Amino acid sequence: MKAVWAFDIGGTHLRAGWFPAAASTKDGSVPRVIPVKKAAWSGRTAESDLQDLEAMLSECLTEWGPPQAVGISIAAMLSPDQSRVVSWPNRPWWQDVDLADRLKRLVGAPVRLEDDAVAAVLGECVAGAAQGRTDVFMVTVGTGIGGGLVSGGRLLRGAHGWAGDFGHLRMTTTGPRCSCGRIGCLQAWASGPALLRAAQESAEAARLSPDAIFAAIREREPWTRAAVDQAVGWLAIGIANVVRLLDPVIVVIGGGVAQSIPAFAENLQAAVRQELGAHPANNVEVVLSSLGDDAGLYGAFSLHFEDKWRNR
Ligand SMILES: [Zn+2]
């Protein structure tokens, strides 16, 4: 059976999933992802990364046969036509890589690329926590902070595909420096590394490794509470601003940090509603992603059926 392959290409890993294409197109339902392959990058050059990617595609070709189409969720800056990777802060040796064309030649099928946060919101809309909703904001909180927007049933990409760059909304003109070089971005206040840095200010953290500090955060040790509350507070301000701007009915929270901390979405929902005060949208739902790490795979798969999904 012809299939759609979905890839999730992240800063530290490669994942691939297989979806039966025929099942998805007849009644608009989305099949479950079947086998998921995983690999880690083996080197630190663009050519080495492309070889890792091509090795995984070749393995998929051997095991799964030729695909009908390939969708890719990638955490990089894409060209406006979404065919090339312009740059990638987490793997800076990627500069202007013609990724879609190179992979298309290898698999002999259409290849579509999408920003990882946009793919994740699409995945949650077609098969996850935002199923059936037409106005959705997805926030991912991990090493960085990402955002994906669906408004009136359409993905919002903007003029250059950069809409939803939530992590780099500037919250303050003083304070921590962001990975983008500027001071005071939301990501510098509320991402995983920011949370770690805030927790390290506590005396209890003095002799603990970063892993042990994150374990304490997951266990809700009282001394980590202030750091978590600070991250939740900054996220709530940013989310409430987006709710005022775009009026989503639901905000889906994904990413490794958000998913590992108990009651993170519940606390965030309370803080967002408080931040919105008497605003009519102050009953906005804030929920945890139901697809978890697979949201990007579902989104990458759905890229080829975007029109069908939109018209459902
Ligand atoms: Zn920034």
Image (cartoon, grey):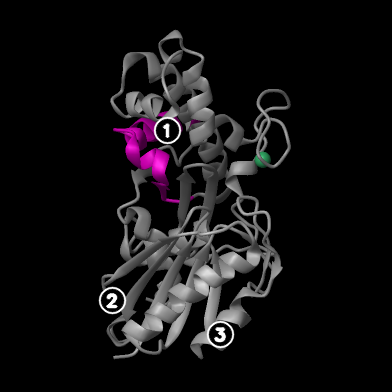
Q: Nearer the viewer, residue 48 or 291?
A: 48
> Which mark is first along the chain, 1 or 2?
2
Q: Residue beneath label 2, please?
A: 29
**Quadrant of the drawing holding the N terminus:** bottom left
Foreground pick, 152 / 216: 216
Sequence-first tag of 3 and 1: 3
Where disc 1 sits, the SS reads helix
Magenta residues span 248-275
Residue 287 vs 310, above or below: the answer is: above
Along the horizontal axis of the image, is 118 left or right of 130? right
Q: Is residue 229 visible?
A: yes
| Number of the label disc, if any, that sits on residue 151 | none
Residue, x 57% and y 30% (percent of image)? 189
Q: Which residue matches tag 3?
A: 104
In the rendered image, residue 252 lying in the magenta stretch gets the answer yes
Closer to the camera: disc 2 or disc 1? 2
Q: CA distance from mark 2 to mark 3?
A: 27 Å
Identify which residue is drawn at 51% across, 42% down: 143
Expressed as whole percent of the image width and height from the top left, the position of residue 151 reads 51, 60
Residue nearest the observer in this picture, 286 or 76: 76
The three-letter amino acid code for the residue at tag 1 is Arg
Residue 281: x and y in percent read 45, 42
Q: Which residue is mark 1?
A: 273
Q: Secondary structure at mark 2?
A: loop
> Quarter-wise, where is residue 216 in the image?
top left
Q: Residues within 10 Å of mark 1 (few under 14, many from 20)?
A: many
Vertical position of residue 290 compared to residue 134: above or below: above
Q: Are marks 2 and 1 in contact (CB under 8 Å)?
A: no
Q: In what quadrant does ligand 1 lie? A: top right
Q: Secondary structure at mark 3?
A: helix
Task: Give how far across and how far down residue 53 sits, in percent.
Answer: 51, 70
Q: Farthest residue in the top direction?
A: 203
